Amino acid sequence: MTLSLISNTPAKNAKLPRRVRDNFLSGLPQPANDVVGNVFSWSLDHPFSFEKQAAPANGDAIVNLAGKDNGDFLVSTNYNSLAPTWYPAEKSLGFDNVKWTAGPRTPAGWMEAQFEAAALQHYLIGGYFLMPTAAQWPATQATIHSIMGDQNGSSNPRLASFRITRNNDAAPGSRAFSAAFGRSGTAPEGITINEPVQFMGKWCFVGIYRNAAERGLYIEALDATVDPVLRTLPVGAKNTDDLAASRVIWGLDNAQALGAGTYFHRAHRGFVENLEATGRAADVISVMKADAARIRARGVIA
């Protein structure tokens, strides 16, 4: 529990931390009161971020907990797709009846402003998802379900995306998690975790990032019954492709199902951070672990 005391009298100690709406933002540069720069952060259990607290409609606001640059919900009606289902107990969105792109996303132009001219292009994209069970896993060969990443199609992100995949119909070992990292003018490079049975059916934190040392995929189960997994690639070169249309979306990106009841994951919370601007690139693993510990202690999802 946090107790906030608000006064009209300025504090004399300039080193006191400023108030933030979410502790993920604690200690980051604040250009103004209640504003944190270079982060887009949302959480469905926070009424400031999602006032509606019900199934979203296309264009509904998702308010940035960092205090500016709000996003919105994209809810497509392609292929008779329906809105995500609202689960009030867990403050989450389920994608059981969704057949096409849907979910909260960063505002137009935000990714371009943060990362296109960035010298280092260090980033963290994170989210909290209830993963499908083994029985709920997509059944079709070569299925790619991007559930988090910049919205340029599930197989070709500009920066990075996280995907639930199936490599072969019902074949042993065919289910996987994968992260795709965009590369200029060529196919993305990937990290794959085959048969991630330890995470199936569990609420998990997923982080994909790039810093001076590496590109990485980090997954941690909130029930803390299994060890987290970290897989990495060499850092590679920054992506110089045009980011004007790039928007990170959490939920489902451009993946069509044959019918309702195909996607069983849920989404609860997410963020994008410009690690180059915030200065947390070298500490990105600690940043992810600390947020997962806070959400685990909060107890809304477990």
Image: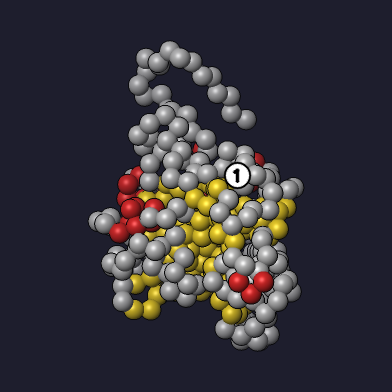
Relative to 185, residue 115 above or below? above
Relative to 7, residue 192 above or below? below
Residue at image position (44%, 41%) is 68
- Nearest the eye: 245 or 238: 245
- Nearest the eye: 245 or 32: 245
Q: Amino acid at mark 1?
A: Phe
Residue 296 in percent (x, y) is at 63, 46
Residue 224 in percent (x, y) is at 64, 53
Relative to 269, residue 9 above or below? above
**Is 56 placed left or right of 107 in the picture?**
right
Residue 153 seen in render? yes
The structure's colour scheme is secondary structure
Position of the N terminus by quadrant: top right
Dot 1 lies on which element?
A: loop
Residue 260 in percent (x, y) is at 72, 72
**Is 203 placed left or right of 38 in the picture?**
right
Q: Name the residue tied to disc 1.
A: 50
Residue 98: quarter of image: bottom right
Residue 137 seen in render? no
Residue at image position (38%, 60%) is 210
